[in-house]
Image (tube, rainbow, N blue to C red):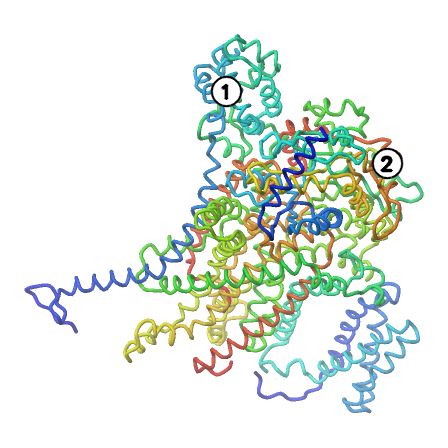
Amino acid sequence: MSYTDDNGPMMTVDGKPLKRSLAIALRRQKIRALLLISPLLIFVLITFLFPIASMLFRSVENDIVSEILPKTVVALSDWDAQSGELPGEIVYSAFAGDIQRAAKAKDHTRVGLRLNYEKSGMASLFKKTARKAKKWDLEADTPFKNKLIETHKGWADIAVWQTLKTHSSRYTSGYFLNSIDMRKTVSGPEFQPEDRQILVTLFKRTLIISLVITISCILLGYPVAWLLANLPMRQANLLMILVLLPFWTSLLVRTSAWKVMLQQQGVINDLLVALGMIEETGRLALINNQLGTVIAMTHILLPFMILPMYSVMQSIPPTYLRAAKSLGATNWTAFWRVYFPQSVPGIGAGSILVFILSIGYYITPEIVGGNKGVFISNRIAYHIFQSMNWGLAAALGTILLVAVLTLYWAYDKIVGIDNVKLGG
Amino acid sequence: MAIFHQVLRRPVSFVLPMMGLMGGFVGVFFGPTFGSALVGLTLVSTVSVFLAYLIISTQYLSQKVIRLILPVPLAILGLIFLGPISGFFGALYGWFFGWFFYWIYEGGYRAKLHPYLTAGQVLWHYSFRVICGLIFTFLITPILVVMPLSFNAQDFFTFTPEMLRLDPVGYSLKHYQDFFNNGDWQRSFWNSLIIAPFATIISVSLGTLAAIGLSQSHVPAKRAIMAILISPMIVPLIISAMGMFFFYSTMGNFMENTLGLDKNLVGYVKVILAHAVLGIPFVIITVTATLVGFDKSLTRAAANMGAGPVKTFFKVQMPLIMPGVISGGLFAFITSFDEVVVVMFIGSASQKTLPWQMFIGLREQISPTILAVATILVGISVLLLMTLELLRRRSERLRGLSPA
Amino acid sequence: MKYKNTVFATAALSLFAGLALAEEMTIVSWGGAYSKSQLKAYHEPYTANTGVTIINDESAGTAVPKLRAMKEAGNLTWDVVDVEAGPAMQLCDEGLAMEIDHDFMLADAPDGTLASVDFGDFIVSECFIPQIVYSYTVGYRNDMVGSTPPTSICAIFDTETYPGKRSLKKGALSNMEWALLCDGVAKADIYPTLETAAGQDQALAKLDTIKDDVIWWSAGADTPQLLADGEVVMGSTFNGRLFALIEEQNQPVSMLWDGQIYDLDGWIIPTGLSPERQARALHYVRFATDTQRLADQSRWISYGPTRASSALLVDKHAELGIDMAPHMPTDPANSKNTFLMNYAFWADYKDDIESKFQAWLAQ
């Protein structure tokens, strides 16, 4: 085979040590691969990962209070929040100075709104105080403790100062605590009052419904993928159009189509009534609940299950099944012990796609989900668009992303991400 | 599959119950015309068994003649007792009955199957087809429902009584006219047609290059790179949209103020780049999948014959991985063409795309125009799919494979 | 003042005239019939007069978060924004909307009345340029309410007389008030009651009685569609949408003028526009809120003009030819029992009550 020399390292024809020559070749290959990948990698890093990271950073960022009320924050650091006593005049006068400057710069509402997420009434407290604070004379109007309490009785409430102190740090765990139905208080994290707990429920619900959707996609997708993979190519491609057409029809259109079909005066109920299968008064509630979400989302995501399954099944030689049968296996055994294990990568690929996509959807659940069929993404959207609590939205998003990444990692370990195929 | 099939008449004890079952099944759907599903079931089932018995016992006319005349008496029966529409369905049932009867009676259902299959296996074979048929129905029905609604004369997503009576008053083309005449719809349509192809070109060209890089045998940190490249697919869209908004605004400001580019141009660039990123995972996934099956000796052969790497790529590799590239490109195209969350953040009103306009049509105004657009797009999709199929056949020819 | 006014107008015009040709401005609004009314009454004549192209952006529903994000990113693409009174106040407080000197920047009434007098109480914030008065009210299917059509807002909670689904907005605002109102709380006591945890629980308990009968809507087009389908027996939405449903689409639906929430919609101009764009925005707003223009809008949609002087000019519908005055929320016959939303209260309690409401909804 190869030529060995006991006296020295193996050499190539041109006299270089083989080891080094191979290393150079390997390095060249690596560099070439990286060169090919790098344009896209850089593109994705800059235009996607960096923006997402800076968005997620908002979940811990909390510099509004310390930036707008710097002196107050310093003065408050000496105050024992659990003492049960109001802070001293130093804090009040520092605050008077801060709020006056903030009012002039029109910054006071920002800090008021930020603190209002934690305690109701803070927004108007800051708004009302700032309106008067503009006219104060910082030298002459002392002591400010009385002055502020006169302006608004809220300043005599220890809880107000506790909230201020608790949320004055530059970085906060508050948003993450909020995302798991807890809150930050002077005495450490504690659970939200029961009638405000919602997010953990939603996380659980998102996972459960997504799982149900994934399972129903597997159940519906497997037979179809099998049929497509085992029919002659021309017929299979014809049927493939039935899979791809819904896939390419706008998500919004399909969602509204399901609304037309599923509602109580909708196509399916009308049909069932017309066939006499249900009473006019007993129309089924198929929409505005979890069932509606599951049906519509299964329909929307089914192609994502069928396509990877199909491409995996296509590569399973039909002879294996025949061989198993000729060796005496029953139909079921042959399928279960021979065919099915080979199709598992397809199921895996489809499942991870469907699961990840369904976790992130919010438009469809919003339209067909009613109050019980909505996801955590709907909450994220709510906090971005309605309450504008972007920190909380980012924290929820981070948790969601970590969950998805864990899943992705597990999948990559078990099946390998290169095995994901989308038809073709 | 089966080569040899003998016409072997099935026994009456098998055929009659089958016809009864089939009749009963159809009868359920005729139920309403008879008053209740149960009446329909019994009636049609009885008539079917009786007819089948009549044909088997008389053996008087040939198959062809029977199948030709069967619809007539059933149509007349329907016409006399129930009305013109039932007459039509009666005829339809007659035709179906004729086909189904002989399919069962002469064993047509076994003609295309392996002769050694047991009865249970044959039953499973057809049950399986029926199950698949139901799933396909599930897939396609929402789209079929949308199409007639797009011709609604009213401005709602509702089947009006006029539509159900097939009264022409209930139908109109006004939503199509709205699409073609309304500036908002036209502008958004053209915007989508500008944005989607550019986004596709970017994601396909960068994505294909990277996929080729990833398919090399020694790639450092392959898993991490793959994870990064696929990340646009796994980050929840709403988070992506928000994060990208801040970044693209800064970038847009830079391009407008420092580079002095036109505001509209910058707007398009922003949306195109954002959509390109979102489409990349699909390109990566499809193209790497094609490359897995790529025979590396071909590139070596090309090099052997004196082709440089560039020439090898375009003349050897490219044509062969083309199907993967095209299907990745189509995924990327659709991603952009159906994307609503990100564009509503990043784009300004001048870059309003079709999904954005549809979103407004659905949420802020009731406008079946979106159904008309959907119907048009389904038509376009069918064309695209056919192109894809033709390309696939072409690539098969190129590879020298015979059509399967 | 009249003199000052003219000076301002001239100044704005001359600044404006100095701008390059082929100008564009982006105006944010709600879409649908409402945008159409603005297009017909404001945009088209304005474009005809000045040659400025107006791009309509239907993002008013998310105007506050988007404006905040734009400001943060320093990339302002909007020139004039149509918002409700509540968000306008919030934008003003946050410094995202420009303060307006109404008398100086807006046109006088034809008889010389100052703008601030002509608009009167509708100027709810120093940044807000009032445009229309609308009502958030309830519509019902005539064929589903039997022989006793509802006359009170509390029909929402009366599932015995009016069985069937009802559609309500997926949110605490308005639902909490109606719940307390129908639970016997006096109008004046509603907001003090809602401040307390017990009051919030009381409202949710009232809503609990109909929870299974409610379809919660989140988009403006939902209730009209649900009513047209007969999917709900009654539902809450804006009076203009109900008008369109009843008069333009001829659906068997009627509108309830009781306990409706009376609200305003108007323009704001974002802060941070370049001087040219700001001048153009002001020029547009001055044009679009003069007496004639506001009256013109009411020819296209059943929302009342906010100027006292325009109310006299309300005419027939431009296409249907029916008298518009009886369909206005400002009509005395319609505004016998209205309810004013307390924005200051909601600014403080929205986060808290909304969290409770959503948690209640998810249970």
Residue A98, labelled with which disc?
1
Tell me the crowding category of disc 2: few under 14, some 14 to 19, or many 20 or more residues within 10 angstroms, Cα based.
some
| Residue at disc 2, secondary structure | loop
Q: Is residue B243 left or right of residue B369?
A: left
Q: Position of residue A296 (x, y in %)?
A: 65, 55
Question: Which residue type does callout 1 highlight?
Answer: Asp
Q: CA distance from mark 1 to mark 2?
A: 48 Å
A324 and A319: which is toward the camera: A319
Q: Is residue C236 visible?
A: no
Are the residues tagged 1 and 2 within 8 Å (C-beta)?
no
Do discs 1 and 2 belong to a common subunit? no
User: With respect to residue C54, does A337 lie above or below?
Assistant: below
Q: Position of residue B122 (x, y in %)?
A: 63, 75
| Residue at x 76% of width, y 75% of height | B17
C76 and A107: which is toward the camera: C76
A7 and C127: which is toward the camera: C127
Question: Which residue type does callout 2 highlight?
Answer: Asp
The residue beneath circle 2 is C331
Task: Name the subunit of mark 1.
Answer: A
Task: Name the subunit of mark 2.
Answer: C
User: With respect to residue A376, does A79 lie above or below?
Assistant: above
